[in-house]
Amino acid sequence: QLHQKKYLCNGEMKEWNGKTEPVYSPVCIKRGDILERKLIGSYPVCTEAEAIEALNAAVAAYNHGRGEWPTMSVAKRIECVEKFTKKMLEQKDIVVKLIMWEIGKSYADSIKEFDRTVEYIYATIDALKDLDRQSSRFEIEQGIVAQVRRSPLGVVLCMGPFNYPLNETFTTLIPALIMGNTLLFKPPKHGTLLHYPLLQAFKECFPKGVVNTIYGRGHSIVPALMQSGKIDVLTLIGSSRVADQLKKLHPKVNRLRAILGLDAKNAAIITPKADLSLAVQETILGSLSFNGQRCTALKIIFIHHSLADRFIEQLNAAIAKLKFGMPWESGVSITPLPEPGKPAYLASLIEDAKANGAKVMNENGGKTVESFVYPAVLYPVNEKMKVYREEQFGPVVPVVPYYSLEEPVQYLIESTHGQQVSVFSNDPEEVASLIDPLVNQVSRVNINCQCQRGPDVFPFTGRKDSAEGTLSVHDALRSFSIRSLVATKLTDPNKQ
Ligand code: G3H
């Protein structure tokens, strides 16, 4: 158990004497006859005053862009991030185990999350070197010589999600940091402990006040931070409802930059010209990897009515082969869900779909055991059901039969989400005819493959309520900085 009592503020590991929040793993244990989530540690619950103290430390370290960090050379900032990454690698074993215990991600996928994060950091460093080379160029136009550079934005409030608590947090935190901003960083509720082994490295590698952590209930500390007007950039991977509420609290919302990864309801469209077994394989990956708890997951499947029976039969057979088990077991796919309310929510979606005419098509579909939920395939799903529009973020696969390709296209037009779509078809003309209507609804169209974020150098964004700003290795550096220039009028030296 990791009972953490410290937090990083203004370059100090401060000892905490106030309230703490227990952390329970989604993995259950038996206590006599009672089955309960295993207690794995606790973390401090900051008060509003402590959160403001941490904010003020970030503001002071930025010092209107005159602090040590924002004025440090790019090469030196890169050195600090490299030093941090080396220290982070020393903590790999414990961080990976904490990811696994805190959110129930399989051990293999927890390792992948860690490794992908480290790769992202090194890719960010390379991208910054490129950007810096471009910035050191001079451009001469109309007798004016200009040096264009990238400058930081100020104080960044960085909040990551529970499903990729390390990776998604760091894909905003690292670019924000390396561009010279100072940070206030709040880990997700499920996924806080795993950041503790890295606090000392933050303290040792960056000047005082550049990285500050806050913990506890977001709704009781974050509003005051936003209301202070001292946050220059809000970065949140979470719900659009929370993002909207927080943005509104900022007294000068037009001065706030928001970099947001939000809700999504990614669809698959499987046409009669698809390779059905490929579509099944990708649907399994897209809908059920990490139990469907990915913003990029496939959350609704449109299948041409003529293929529906065969598709569902093959899908059920593939689901039956998925291994159910504890996250440390090898080859495991279905693992316990970290959010305690999730099984009941998924059950309510299933009941609502049943009441409106759908059936659970697979054996054990939706069955809840401890904190596990067995994947459920729902068919035929229609617009009266909640699962048709709501983002289930869990192992429920709604399948909608369609007659004309206009129907899924219309679904996407009407959707409030606009992250990604997958099209399964081997007919190049059919695919070509869909690309334009789809790419104007979502920010990524995947042909014959599942929706996903990676490779991380690709732009990651969304339309409508799905995102604000773009994250990828290169785009994130631009998102967390502003292009500024030093323009000098060329004078004729002979004139003086
Ligand atoms: O939850 C959103 C993640 O960024 C998804 O990443 O598509 O690589 O699983 P992924």
Image (cartoon, rainbow, N blue to C red):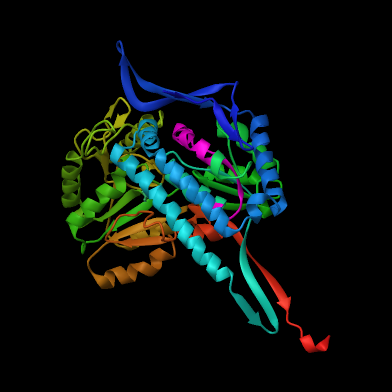
Residue 259 position (above or below residue 6): below
Residue 253 position (above or below residue 19): below
| Residue 144 visible somewhere in the drawing | yes
The image quadrant that residue 107 belongs to is: top left
Q: In the image as oriented, which residue stretches furthest toward the top?
A: 32
Front residue of this view, candidates 271 and 166 = 166
Magenta stretch: includes residue 199 = yes
Q: Residue at x 63, y 28 (%)?
A: 47
Pinpoint residue 387: horizontal percent, then vertical percent.
37, 42
> Quadrant of the image for the N terminus?
top left
288 sits to left or right of 87? left
Front residue of this view, candidates 324 and 316 = 324
Q: Residue at x 43, y 49 (%)?
A: 264
81 sits to left or right of 326? right
The residue range painted magenta reads 178-202
All told, the count of numbered labels is: 0
| Residue 384 visible somewhere in the drawing | no
Magenta stretch: includes residue 415 = no
